[in-house]
Image (spheres, rainbow, N blue to C red):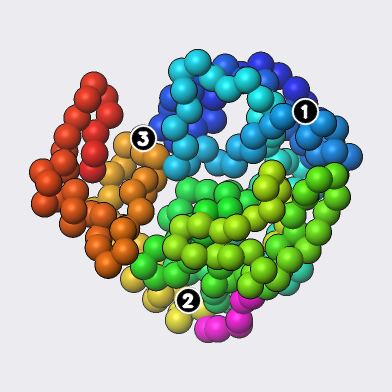
Amino acid sequence: MRVERVLLKDYTTLGVGGPAELWTVETQEDLLKATEAPYRVLGNGSNLLVMDEGVPERVIRLAGEFATYDLRGWVGAGVLLPLLVQEAARQGLSGLEGLLGIPAQVGGAVKMNAGTRFGEMADALEAVEIFHEGSFHVYLPQELGFGYRQSRLPPGGIVTRVRLKLKERPLEEIRRRMAEVDAARKGQPKRKSAGCAFKNPPGQSAGRLIDERGFKGLRIGDAMVS
């Protein structure tokens, strides 16, 4: 385990965020120790806007055994989702193509049920291991209240591992599906971004509402609505 004072701007995709005490945990024992005081969990730092003042709580980041994976077994919550999507395709396993390009770690993707119009994280889950109140518990997806960009994890729970529901398919079929998803992403901004920050309200499209109100392109300093 490593504990250090850092600026969170170096750990977020937006490149903003003040000081914090970062606990990089590599084992279950590390996680037990790191959660002995108030904490927050940091994944890949996307969909995250951190105050310049920083945060007073410990910031926990999963590494070590939590960043290993076996696509036919358990996958650590600290694994990068883009890596997993590509590796699944390489092994001829289908089920993650709709998540192509989402800049998340697995744990964060589960927490917010990350997804696109082609699919979401909950679709690919068989089981989720969560650290909660000092012990590890395994949940079925239907127990976690997944919905549009949300879940109902136990309060303070930390996703540590998942088992994925993947199917063997011809590589050409998987690549074709990934190309379809990738084509839909071509118009997205290439500079620093928080990701897709606005949720669609019921029966509406957030993107369409932003366009209709003339907010697309609105800029304050170096921050812009795309």
Residue pointed to by mark 1: 37
Q: Is residue 145 visible?
A: yes
Q: Amino acid at mark 3?
A: Lys
Question: Which percent across, then down, holds residue 84?
Answer: 59, 59
Is 209 rendered above or below residue 22? below
Residue 205 horizontal side relative to residue 42, left or right: left
Which element carries disc 3, helix, strand or loop? loop
Taking the spot 23% from the left edge, 43% from the top edge, the residue there is 226
Residue 148: quadrant of the picture? bottom left
Q: Which residues are magenta?
A: 163-170
Residue shown at 55% from the left, 83% from the top: 169
- Say what secondary structure mark 2 lies in: helix
With respect to residue 154, does 56 lie above or below? above
Q: Nearer the viewer, mark 2 or mark 1?
A: 1
Reading the image, the residue beneath label 3 is 192
- N-terminal-most mark, 3 or 1: 1
Residue marked by disc 2: 174
Q: Residue at x 31, y 42 (%)?
A: 190
Label 2 crowding class (10 Å Cα cut-off): few <14, some 14-19, many 20+?
A: many
Q: CA distance from mark 2 to mark 3?
A: 29 Å
Residue 198 located within the stretch drawn in magenta = no
Q: Residues within 10 Å of mark 3 (few under 14, many from 20)?
A: few
